[in-house]
Image (cartoon, rainbow, N blue to C red):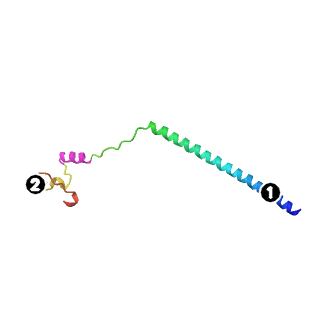
Amino acid sequence: MEEKLQKAQAKKQREEAQLQRQVELEEKRNVRAKLKLNTRQKLSNKLNNASAKPPQVAQPSNKRQERASAAQAGVQAGDELSAAPAKVTLRGRKINLPQNYR
């Protein structure tokens, strides 16, 4: 008699555990589905907003222009203007040394 009661209780516990697992799995599925939906919406919003904006173009730096304008205005731009005349190779090309080696 006790064995039958124990078997019945064990069976009932197994069924309850199985139902509990199914409920937990269903909750996990719902959470995953919500996350998927959110990511899809965010992606679609991002794509829609990105298509409306023009691409950003990097502005070229104008350091050489600034230096040239300063030299023309009579402002000394450093050691370059007061340096000795540029060295020339045998073929007639100017040698431009970096500032570190001047």
Q: Which residue is mark 1?
A: 11
Q: Secondary structure at mark 2?
A: loop
Q: Residues within 10 Å of mark 2 (few under 14, many from 20)?
A: few
Viewport quadrant of the N terminus: bottom right
Query: Was residue 64 drawn as part of the magenta stretch in this picture?
Result: yes
Question: Considering depth in this image, is 67 or 50 the residue closer to the camera?
Answer: 50
Q: Secondary structure at mark 1?
A: helix
Q: Which residue is mark 2?
A: 90
Q: Position of residue 55 (x, y in %)?
A: 40, 40
Amino acid type, mark 2: Leu
Query: Was residue 10 drawn as part of the magenta stretch in this picture?
Result: no
Residue furthest out toward the left: 90
What residue is shown at x 63% (from left), y 48% (from top)?
31
Side of 11 relative to 23 (left or right): right
Q: Position of residue 62 (x, y in %)?
A: 27, 46
Amino acid type, mark 1: Lys
What residue is shown at x 77% (from left), y 57% (from top)?
14
Side of 68 relative to 54 (left or right): left
Span highlighted in magenta in the image: 63-74
What residue is shown at x 86% (from left), y 60% (from top)?
4
